[in-house]
Image (tube, rainbow, N blue to C red):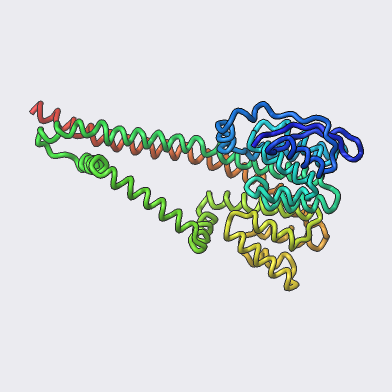
Amino acid sequence: MPQYHYKARDRQGELVTGVLDAVDEKKVVNDLDHLGYSVVEISLDSKTGEGGLSQLFERFQRLEKREVIIFTRQLATLLRSGTVLSVSLTTLCEQIENKKFQTILRDISQSVQSGKSFSESLSKYPKVFSELFISMVEVGETGGMLDQVLDRLATLGTQELETQSRIKSALIYPVVLVVIALVVVNFLVVGVLPKFVMVFRASEAKLPVITQIVLGVSFVIRRFWMFLAAGGFLLVLGFHRYFHTNEGRFRIHSLMLKVPIFGTLYSKIQISRFAKITSVLIASGIPILQALVVVEKTVTNVVLRRAIQSIRYAITEGHPLSEPFKASGLFSPMVVQMISTGERSGNLDQMLSEISSFYEPEIDYTIRNLTALLEPFMLLVMGIMVSFIALSVLLPIFNLIKVFRG
């Protein structure tokens, strides 16, 4: 649909600029008139005529979380400076480089200008703006502190992005080692070893057990690789389907929390994120029960999600907050004690923030330890695999040399 840039004046006589998607100029004039604007100038966007290729590119363009965080921070800054929401959104639309995100923000801006609330306009894009984001914006609009809420959301998003970045960075080296090991082993087993088979068989020498094992593996891979690939695909498909059942997801998430070392890290990340989000929600003025409802929708681990449900039910029945936290078995005694202290003192949001701050260095320390352990372990496994295959080739060669000398 063609895009039209417009300049108009609102009811107070202030100049307003923006972009509208419309069939023709008449539709733009009608839309602006409906908003109470007096049209000054309308011009067709020259890039609109580039056709379907740019629209196709926009459809598949990826929207990064970092872009949403930057937008949130910039919007908070504009609102704090006294700029009204509609003008702030229009201004930011012109600055966004990501065309897909720009289209989304333009639609949100038009929705706000038509009289809908900001949170209601955001709810049209649940894949871009989370339940947490929309709920906090709604609270900010109601309480007249939208800039403060957006600042908290931007800070929260930045912290989560940094945690994800640290985890990804820690996993890059082990993943690269695994890929290299698989490539090397596959090359030796499938490409190099079969060339020695004829020589070994012609010598009629007895092959070592290690060589027979590797030759058997090589034969199976070369002859039945299609069946192995199909079996692997079916295995992954079956796991995927099982994971998307309620029972399967619960069991797998339970296992993830219990795996040695990795489970500890995963548990710390989940609890830290829960404490951080709940703290931000309560600090924004959301009651604890409503905050837990929002957090429950944002938590990815099913075990923790069910624990939050139990905590909500216990609170509605009049139990102290610390009791259901302790009964869940997912929170350490220190966390339970800090929550109890925060409940009694009326500073629950501060205590939850302290819990999150306590776990941050713990998570960083665990990630560094995991990286330090994984690197030598992967090198050792890779060395053993390559040595095993090398011995399966060298031992028969040594036997052949003995036969030739004899």
Give the left or right position of residue 327, taking residue 315 as reference. Answer: left
**Which residue is pictured at 36% across the width and 34% down the height?**
183
Give the left or right position of residue 102, taking residue 85 as reference. Answer: left
Camera-side residue of 288 and 398: 288
Question: Which quarter of the picture shows residue 257?
Answer: bottom right
Is residue 210 something one can see in this rendering? no
Give the left or right position of residue 180, taking residue 131 as reference. Answer: left
**Which residue is pictured at 60% across the width and 28% down the height?**
50
Is residue 12 something one can see in this rendering? yes
Camera-side residue of 125 and 337: 125
x, y percentage for residue 188? 29, 33
Q: Residue furthest front?
A: 26
x, y percentage for residue 309? 65, 65
State the quadrant of the N terminus. Answer: top right
x, y percentage for residue 36? 85, 42
Question: Which quarter of the picture shows residue 368?
Answer: top right
**Which residue is pictured at 45% across the width and 58% down the height?**
242
x, y percentage for residue 192? 25, 31
